[in-house]
Image (spheres, rainbow, N blue to C red):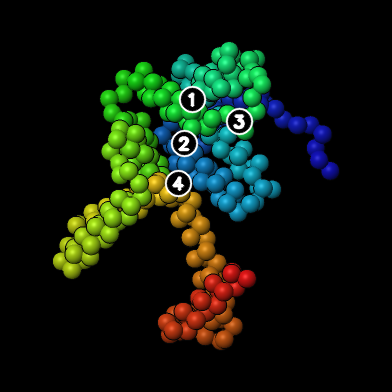
């Protein structure tokens, strides 16, 4: 039976205050600081993405709660140092989103509403243009000096590469269509093959990175998220390889003692099964 009492956001904020209390709190929580929580924040964000990818919606409230808890940590650190608190985070976020959505809040405040035009009839290209222009203005107000400013170093490499190339594209540094990105992939692949022949590890590393970056550029032109595309491929690989393992095990053999032709046959079997 579900507990009749439901905790609130205020309860969660109080919980963090108690955990961080030097006298009554938890030693682990008291010892944490800005830098030590960052790895946990990244991990929790990935676990939210993983639950969504697996359509594990029953797990999602818990995973989203774990991610929210990271924000509560930062709010507590800010409060303890007299910098900001959770309510400041909510205020800044709400004000920023209202300002970025003049097509929804034409009066510039939360109570104003667009009249007479359904969301499906709003020009999304104009919305995107205004959104990017407003974000550019926000970067300018922070004394940004480059189109590439404020792209977090801690982003997954594919995501960061995509943001870097997208920002460069806004400055006009881009091919007019995907054909240029495809040609760049062919060029980078040829350069990697040449370095493989030399056996120079450092240059092979550089050329492989260039090839991956070129692939990310192609993904952007095709409007494909490279992180999601690679996650999907990894999931398919895992399913198929597990099928291969099961098939080999059921035949009474060890996978590391099975010839490649047999493994490939089971792999194709797995692909056909997925197709059905």
2 or 4: tag closer to the N-terminus:
2
Q: CA distance from mark 4 to mark 3?
A: 22 Å
* Residue 188, horizontal then vertical, whole percent: 25, 57
Residue nearest the viewer, comparing 158 with 271? 271
1 or 3: tag closer to the N-terminus:
1
2 or 3: tag closer to the N-terminus:
2
Q: CA distance from mark 1 to mark 4?
A: 39 Å
Circles 4, 3 touching at the beta carbon (< 8 Å): no
Q: Identify the residue at horizontal 47%, vertical 41% (top origin).
A: 42
Q: Secondary structure at mark 1?
A: helix
Q: Which residue is mark 4?
A: 223
Q: Quadrant of residue 110?
A: top right
Circles 2, 1 touching at the beta carbon (< 8 Å): yes
Q: Is residue 138 visible?
A: yes
Q: Quadrant of residue 166?
A: top left
Q: Secondary structure at mark 4?
A: loop
Q: Which residue is mark 2?
A: 37
- Against 186, is 167 above or below? above
Q: Identify the residue at horizontal 48%, vertical 25% (top origin).
A: 77
- The reply, left or right, for residue 24 in relation to residue 129 is right
* Residue 102, horizontal then vertical, whole percent: 54, 20
Q: CA distance from mark 2 to mark 4?
A: 33 Å
Q: Nearer the viewer, mark 2 or mark 4?
A: 4
* Residue 194, horizontal then vertical, whole percent: 18, 64
Q: Which residue is mark 3?
A: 121
**Which disc, if any, is residue 77?**
1
Quadrant assignment for the C terminus: bottom right
Q: Secondary structure at mark 2?
A: helix
Q: Quadrant of residue 189?
A: bottom left
């Amino acid at each position: 039976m579900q507990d009749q009492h439901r905790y609130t956001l205020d309860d969660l904020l109080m919980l963090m205050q108690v955990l961080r209390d030097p006298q009554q709190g938890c030693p682990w929580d008291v010892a944490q600081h800005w830098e030590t929580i960052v790895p946990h924040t990244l991990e929790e964000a990935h676990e939210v993405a993983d639950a969504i990818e697996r359509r594990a919606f029953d797990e999602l409230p818990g995973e989203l709660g774990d991610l929210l808890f990271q924000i509560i940590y930062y709010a507590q650190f800010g409060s303890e140092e007299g910098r900001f608190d959770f309510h400041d985070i909510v205020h800044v976020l709400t004000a920023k989103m209202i300002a970025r959505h003049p097509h929804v809040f034409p009066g510039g405040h939360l109570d104003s509403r667009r009249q007479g035009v359904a969301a499906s009839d709003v020009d999304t290209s104009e919305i995107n243009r205004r959104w990017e222009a407003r974000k550019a203005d926000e970067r300018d107000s922070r004394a940004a000096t480059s189109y590439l400013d404020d792209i977090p170093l801690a982003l997954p490499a594919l995501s960061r590469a995509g943001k870097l190339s997208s920002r460069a594209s806004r400055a006009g540094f881009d091919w007019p269509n995907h054909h240029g990105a495809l040609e760049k992939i062919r060029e980078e692949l040829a350069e990697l093959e040449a370095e493989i022949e030399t056996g120079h590890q450092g240059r092979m590393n550089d050329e492989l990175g260039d090839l991956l970056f070129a692939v990310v550029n192609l993904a952007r032109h095709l409007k494909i998220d490279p992180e999601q595309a690679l996650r999907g491929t990894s999931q398919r690989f895992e399913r198929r390889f597990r099928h291969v393992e099961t098939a080999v095990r059921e035949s009474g053999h060890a996978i590391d003692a099975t010839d490649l032709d047999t493994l490939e046959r089971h792999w194709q079997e797995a692909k056909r099964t997925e197709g059905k």
